[in-house]
Amino acid sequence: MAKYLFYKRLSKLLTQSGRLGFCSRSLAGHRGIHSAPSSLTQLSDDELLLKDAVCRYAKEKIAPRSREFEALGRVPEDVLKDLFHQGWFGVRIPMEYGGSGGNFFSTVLLIEEFGKVDAAISGMIDLQNTLINGIALDFCNEEQRKKYLPLLNTSMIGSFCLSEQGSGSDAFAMQTRAVRDGDDYIINGSKLWITSASLAGVYFVMANAAPEKGYKGITCFIVDADTPGLTVSRPENKLGLGASTTCPVILEDVRVPACNIVGGIGLGYKIIASMLNEGRIGIGAQVIGIAQGVLDYVIPYTLERKQFGRQLFDFQAMQHQIAQAYTQIEAGRLLVYNAARLRDQNQSIAKAAAMAKYYCSEAAVQICLNGVKWLGALGYMKDTPIEKHLRDSLAGVIYEGTSNIMLNTIAKLIQNEYAS
């Protein structure tokens, strides 16, 4: 059976406290004005319970083993099974498909909390709940949803195959091709830097099925992991996010039925734009979680550590730096939460998502670097999580749109607003 145990527990808890009616409305996705929080960071009862539950789980189950995961180069099978069992991979999946029926904002809370202790797991949960489940929910037909959503909720990791050697920031320059052959399509090409590729049971592959139409020929295909011709190469040796496997995916005469097309021929570019916007909000949450994890470790240290007869926190230079970092985190969190709330209200999120990802990723890298400095020699050691947070945070300024691409996007949207 599908595991939406967490939300069952939420309902039970709220029933005992007399608040079941509110919880049911919220978890079912109703977003009436009467239930809207008075500020972006003021959470509803069920959002607070979700945040607290994930926080406890991450601290008790993930944090003690984070270094183990990195050394292993992947998330162990027992941990993956438990993450599925808790329902963390299917927060947005409707109850009719066995999921939790939560909203996009709930996903953001989840990603942020895991980011505080292990960015690799946070990233996997981000990818599954934003890009993978997002494609299935927003673009797949009902037959495809019924086939894949229950699996994505309970046992199956998905991968999003977009980037290629010659098409990183210029995603529409992809060379992977899909050629019609009767009722099937034959796909040939290579994809690079594919997250969770070695674990995936299904791949959403972007290929151009009508090259003469340029980017309007890009099409999304569902390719099952056991399809002949699909090969996952060895994982890349990365600077950070070591527990998240990132691999090339090779497609050689991969035959898929036409019924595995998502949305229709040429809809791929719209899927890419839509899903990357959601993914960028998730990355904003991930890196804000990383940065918060640094402060959660560093501030208690500065209150205990003494030099020259004074606590480190008592030095004004330290106070100013920590105050600045705290303000940056809060500002970034507001950008992320605002973008997530807009997504739940089905409003345009392109600019909000780009601003959230740009600001949060750049701020997180600087805060993590400062965290190493604040701890001194201890920050340079692997005895603390700070150096790992720094390495993990650097990916945030690169994937799903580099910082320069985010600035280009923001500027273009600003220009459009003022020119209209």
Image (cartoon, helix red, strand yellow):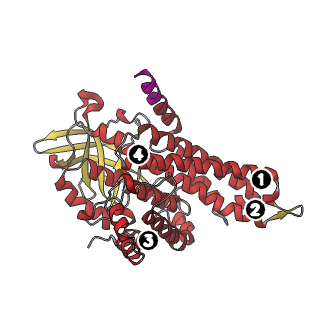
Q: Residues within 10 Å of mark 4 (few under 14, many from 20)?
A: some
Q: Is residue 224 magenta?
A: no
Q: Residues within 10 Å of mark 1 (few under 14, many from 20)?
A: some
Magenta-highlighted residues: 411-420
* 252 w.r.t. 75: above or below: above
Q: Nearer the viewer, residue 31 or 128?
A: 31
Look at mark 2 in the image and give the residue it sits on.
302
Q: Nearer the viewer, mark 3 or mark 1?
A: 1
* Contact flag, marks 2 and 1 (Cβ < 8 Å): yes
* Contact flag, marks 3 and 1 (Cβ < 8 Å): no
- For the view shown, which residue lies furthest in the front direction? 34
What amino acid does circle 1 point to?
Met
- Label drawn at residue 318: 1
Residue at the image position 61 percent from the left and 46 percent from the top:
363
Marked residue nearer the N-terminal end (4 or 2): 2
Q: Main secondary structure of the magenta part?
A: helix
* Contact flag, marks 4 and 1 (Cβ < 8 Å): no
Q: Quadrant of the N terminus?
A: bottom left
C-alpha distance separating marks 3 and 1: 38 Å
C-alpha distance separating marks 3 and 4: 32 Å
Q: Secondary structure at mark 2?
A: helix
Q: Quadrant of the C terminus?
A: top left
* Contact flag, marks 2 and 3 (Cβ < 8 Å): no
Picture coordinates of residue 117, whole percent (x, y)? 56, 63
Q: Secondary structure at mark 3?
A: helix
